[in-house]
Image (tube, grey):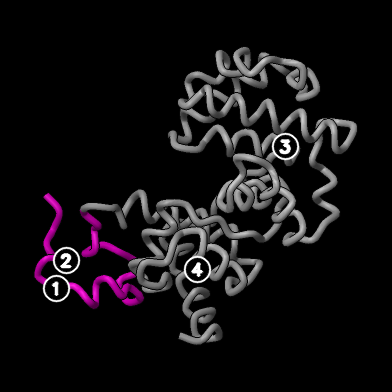
Amino acid sequence: MKNKTRTDQISRVHRRLIECYGLPAPKTYHRILDALIETILSQNTSDINSHRAHLSLKKRFPGWKEAVSARPQAIATVIRTGGLAGIKSRRISKLLKLINEEQGLVSLEYLKKLSPEQAYHKLLSYDGVGPKTAACTLLFGAGMPVFPVDTHVYRVCQRLGWARPKESAESFQERIGVIIPPAQVFNLHVNLISHGRQTCQPRLPDCSRCCLREYCKHLKDSKPKNLMEERP
C-alpha cells in the first residue's frame, strides 16, 4: 500500500479510536531525563510497578545530581519493585554519569533544541536505550512527534495489516513513524495501547465489538465463524 493511501487509513483509524476511547489526557514530564529514567524502569514490567520504582527513586534522590555518585547497588535497592533491579540500576548509574560528563550537569533538556531525528539518535547512543525507549522519552518528555511501538501497538498494527509479515517491531516503528501525521502521533499511540489492552488482546481479541473491524486485515483473512463468536 502506498504511503498516501496508508496515511489516509491511519487518519481514519485515528478518528475512530478517538470516537471509541476519547482524547487521551496529556502525560508529560517536566524534564526529559525523568521521562527517560521512568521508561527504562518500565522495561519488562507493568506501568504500576515502574511508576512505583520511579517514585521511590525520586524520593531517595530528589535531584539526579545526587544519584550520580550513588553506587548501582544503592539504586537497585530503591527500584527493586520495578523488576530487573540489577540490570536497570547499572544502566541508570552509567547513564547519569555519562550525561554529567558530557553536559557538565545531569540534564537532557538541550535535546529540545534539536530536531526530533537528532534527539532520537542521541538517545540511541546511550547503553540500554533502544528505539521504543527513545521514542517514548521524546514523545512524553519533550512533546516531540516520535511514534513508539510497544507490544500492544505492534499487535494491533499487525492485525490491521500495517506491519509487514515477519517485520520486527523496531523496523516497523522506523517505517511507520515517517508516515503518521505529526499531529496524530500522541493520540494514536495512546489509543492504540488502550485498544490493544481492552479489545484487541493477544489470545482472544473481542472482534465482535471492535471499533476498527472495517479496517482489520486479520478479521478479513480469518474464518468469520471463529472471529464472530461471542466471548464467554
Give the camera-side residue of 30 and 36.
36
Q: Please tell me whether residue 167 is drawn above or below residue 103 in the rendered image.
A: below
Residue occupying image coordinates x 82% and y 56%: 114
Q: CA distance from mark 4 to mark 2?
A: 23 Å
Contact check, label 1 and label 4, Cβ < 8 Å: no
SS type, badge 2: helix
Total labels: the figure holds 4
How many other residues sit within 10 Å of disc 4, few (<14), some (14-19) or many (≥20)?
Answer: some
Sequence order check, earlier mark of 4 and 2: 4
Q: CA distance from mark 3 to mark 1?
A: 47 Å
Callout 2 amino acid: Leu
Question: Which residues make up the magenta segment?
Answer: 204-232
Sequence order check, earlier mark of 1 and 4: 4
Residue ID for mark 3: 33
Contact check, label 1 and label 2, Cβ < 8 Å: yes
Residue occupying image coordinates x 73% and y 20%: 67
Residue ID for mark 4: 14
Q: CA distance from mark 3 to mark 2?
A: 44 Å
Q: Position of residue 82 (x, y in %)?
A: 49, 26
Say the numbered circle drawn on residue 224: 1
Residue occupying image coordinates x 59% and y 62%: 185
Callout 1 amino acid: Pro
